[in-house]
Amino acid sequence: MYRLPRGTSDIFGANIEKWHWMEEKVREITRTFNYREMRTPIFEHSELFARSVGETTDIVEKEMYTFTDRGKRSLSLRPEGTAGIVRSYVEHKLYADPQPTKLYYLGPMFRYENPQAGRTRQFHQFGAEAFGSLDPALDAEVISLGMSFFASLGLQNVVVQINSVGDAESRPRYRQRLIDYFTPYEQQLSAIDRSRLHRNPLRILDSKDPATRELLTEVPSILNSLSKEAAEHFELLQQYLSDLSIQYVVDPLLVRGLDYYTLTAFEFYTEIEGAQAGTIGGGGRYNQLVGEIGGPDMPGIGFALGLERVMLACEKQSCGPTDHAGIDCYLITFDHQTKKAAVSLLQRLRQAGLTAEVDYLGRKMKAQLKAADRLQAKFALIIGEEELAAEKVAVKNLQDGQQIMIGLEQVIHYVKEQRSVI
Ligand code: HAM
């Protein structure tokens, strides 16, 4: 017996309807915000993720699915979508087009994590990235895009937490302030936080270790280390969010698990059924990333939402697609001759845009009617010997049980007309 690899899932049955529903909402919302889809490979050169996500991040150090291909290249399954999108933006010189360039993506990502509710090794993200503008109104648009998506699903109580992680001027200053603050407590820090102290002290703010967390109550706020421009950007963002009636909370301890952020950083939270982490998405600005991976000096901002987590949140709030509508017609046959007539009618019904099914298991009429019921068919189209001889079909309305004879040529027209009144 083969089993699923740990941390992955098969999506089928009623769940696939939910995924289609969510994916349709993604397409609807991104269209109104004028973001266009980009599809990048599922794997990239490992180096790209080290350069962009950051060599000292958990994602790159511990969570990537990295392999060497037959040409001896080191490749990694993408742990997130931004790196590939930025690579593509640079590679195809999209920066030469009139800016901003606004893109979205939808697809599987891979991280070797400890699987639990809402945390899997293959998961799906809906992400959006906008390049080429420093305007804080674009930061607000990106956050608003995420919030509008949640609203379109009917999800309530989503809170966005925001912070500024500073710019090239403020970051080194804050980094030093953190090192100065934590150094006297170095022995109190967990081994992992101690190792971060000089490599990536901002990551300590995200520590799960209780002893470290106690030290965070007094930690200097990044908001006091911001340059004038960074502070102004953050202030304007908040004004735009208020204008858009987006409820936000400023959290000066919010740092993200990826290194490419500058200025705005944010996360979306809501309650999730059975999961510890209620973070359903996150994002921020990355004004240096395009330049760092070989492009011109072009700013960017974006987010990614974890769709499995969004799905769990939907379950908690009982949001979902309206019931899957049944099929239009189920064709009932009795022998080879009537089956032949049914198969041609089946094709014509489908060509006319109707959903139609026939029995392939040689079942008795009663069992065929049961099958029609299971598929929530609106009509059973019965083709027996008599009907065949008269070139007619017995059309049974499965809602009210009424049955009438219709000419073989008129049946499509009849079903189309009747189905709209059911
Ligand atoms: P991230 O915070 O690493 O950011 O991931 C975004 C979201 O993906 C998380 O909030 C979570 O909902 C979901 N997610 C992450 N890991 C898992 C997992 N193992 N299982 C299930 N869901 C997960 C990024 O990926 C950035 N690329 C976001 C971004 C785009 N920033 C700028 N542009």
Image (tube, helix red, strand yellow):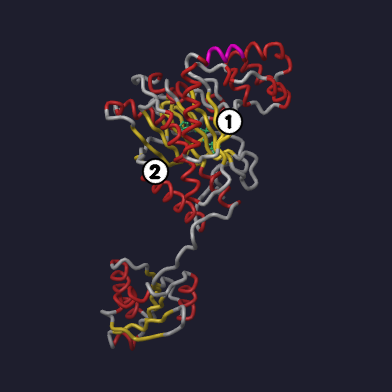
User: Residue 30 has which mark?
Assistant: 2
Please state which of the two labelled residues, at mark 2 or mark 1, is closer to the viewer: 1
Q: Position of residue 149 (x, y in %)?
A: 47, 45
Q: Amino acid at mark 2?
A: Thr
Residue at left offset 66%, top offset 16%: 194
**To which quarter of the image does residue 201 belong?**
top right
Question: What is the magenta segment's predominant secondary structure?
Answer: helix
User: Which of marks 1 and 2 precedes in the sequence?
Assistant: 2
Residue at left offset 49%, top offset 17%: 228
Q: Amino acid at mark 1?
A: Val
Query: Is the residue 361 above or below the residue 119 in the image?
Result: below
Residue 125 visible? The answer is: no
Q: Which residues are magenta?
A: 171-177
Residue annotated with mark 1 = 250
Q: Position of residue 282 (x, y in %)?
A: 52, 34
Residue at left offset 31%, top offset 66%: 353
Q: Which class describes the residues within 10 Å of circle 1: few (<14), some (14-19), or many (20+)?
A: some
Quadrant containing the C terminus in the rendered view:
bottom left
Would residue 358 appear left or right of 61 to someone viewing this image?
left
Q: Position of residue 181 (x, y in %)?
A: 66, 13
Q: CA distance from mark 2 to mark 1?
A: 26 Å
Would residue 214 appear left or right of 282 to someone viewing this image?
right
Residue 355 magenta: no
Residue at left offset 61%, top offset 51%: 316
Q: Which class describes the residues within 10 Å of circle 2: few (<14), some (14-19), or many (20+)?
A: many
Q: Helix, strand or loop at disc 2?
A: helix
Would residue 19 appear left or right of 217 to someone viewing this image?
left
Q: Helix, strand or loop at disc 1?
A: strand
Query: Is the residue 144 above or below the residue 351 in the image?
Result: above
User: Residue 285 has which mark?
Assistant: none
